[in-house]
Image: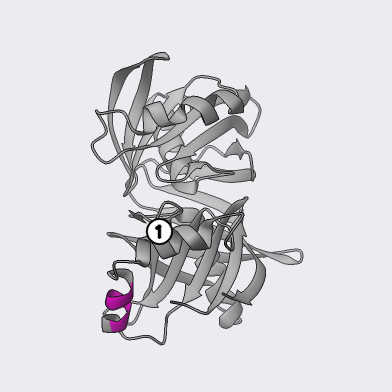
Amino acid sequence: MLKQFIKYQSLGNDFILFDWNDRSELSIVDCIQHPQWGSYVVKCCDRHRGIGADGVLILKKNIDGLPEMLIFNSDGSPAQICLNGIRCCAHYLACQNPGMQSMNIFSGKRSIGCQIIPSDNCLQIMTHVSAPVYEKLISISTVEGIFNGHCVDVGNPHFVLFEKKQLGWLAQHGMLIERHPLFEQKTNVEFVWQENEDDPATYRVLVFERGCGITQSCSSGAVAVMVALHHLGMIKAKQPTNLVMLGGILECTISQSGDVSLKGSADPVFWGKN
């Protein structure tokens, strides 16, 4: 279906990026609505028989000619938003346009502000997410017990649990929460516990992503964690907070109004043709 691609990663969350900026909207719709598109994404993301990735990113222009990102999970399903993916697209656009310092990238129903920050020999990307929504605290029952978590809407659903878990446990049982009947469209899952109370406060986060399973990091999950922490009074507005994920550290703050800013890196891994 497609030929040229760039393998990108941000905090270990890896993607296959296709640049469709020169394609018409009609050709894009025809491609992603093709009956074999989902299986093609699965094949591309297969780490043994394909390129290997957590998902596929499509960078295109929206109806107003502005950057827009489409994201598909490794199981072929579409996703509403992916901030690690946004960071990769922002890095790509900044490299294509030297001197660019900021941009907005549309994804799903959101416009994500991105600020380019040169740092040593790499680029750091600051992303700004406006008004994610804290929904409610709920309890769900599974064969592994009862889990109390916070539902947060970041443009995609998240279930944040303040409980320490081992990676092996999450790999084996995370799907029980992700696919619990209470979550009609499944949910992303974040287990969170505090590492230290220093400045900045540091929390460790394990992620089980909807449609992907365990991933090295999830920045929309980081936003959900910050919203839950702020809602519970565990962090203050504008307080520097580090979220430690398997793939690296995100530097985070939340404003008094609830907007969340994240700073992290993104890098191309390799270019190729499939």
| Image colouring | one colour
Q: Is residue 30 visible?
A: yes
| Viewer-nearest residue: 254 or 90 | 90
Does the segment drawn in magenta span residue 158? no
Give the crowd class for mark 1: few <14, some 14-19, many >=20 residues within 10 Å.
Answer: many
Which residue is pictured at 67% across the width and 70% down the height?
270
Which residue is pictured at 41% across the width and 68% down the height?
104
Quadrant placement of the C terminus: bottom right
The secondary structure making up most of the magenta span is helix
**Which segment did they paint magenta?**
27-31
Kindly identify the amino acid type of the residue bearing the numbered disc 1.
Phe
Residue 109 position (above or below residue 238): below
- The residue carrying mark 1 is 72
Q: Is residue 227 left or right of residue 135?
A: right
Does the segment drawn in magenta span residue 28? yes
Q: Position of residue 67 (x, y in %)?
A: 39, 74
Quadrant placement of the N terminus: bottom left
| Viewer-nearest residue: 182 or 203 | 182
Q: Secondary structure at mark 1?
A: strand
Q: Position of residue 149 (x, y in %)?
A: 37, 23
Q: How many marks?
A: 1
| Viewer-nearest residue: 68 or 232 | 68
Which residue is pictured at 43% across the width and 24% down the height?
161
Outermost residue to the top = 145
Q: Is residue 112 visible?
A: no
Q: Position of residue 131 (x, y in %)?
A: 32, 47
Q: Position of residue 8 (x, y in %)?
A: 60, 64
Which residue is pictured at 55% across the width and 20% down the height?
164
| Viewer-nearest residue: 242 or 17 | 17
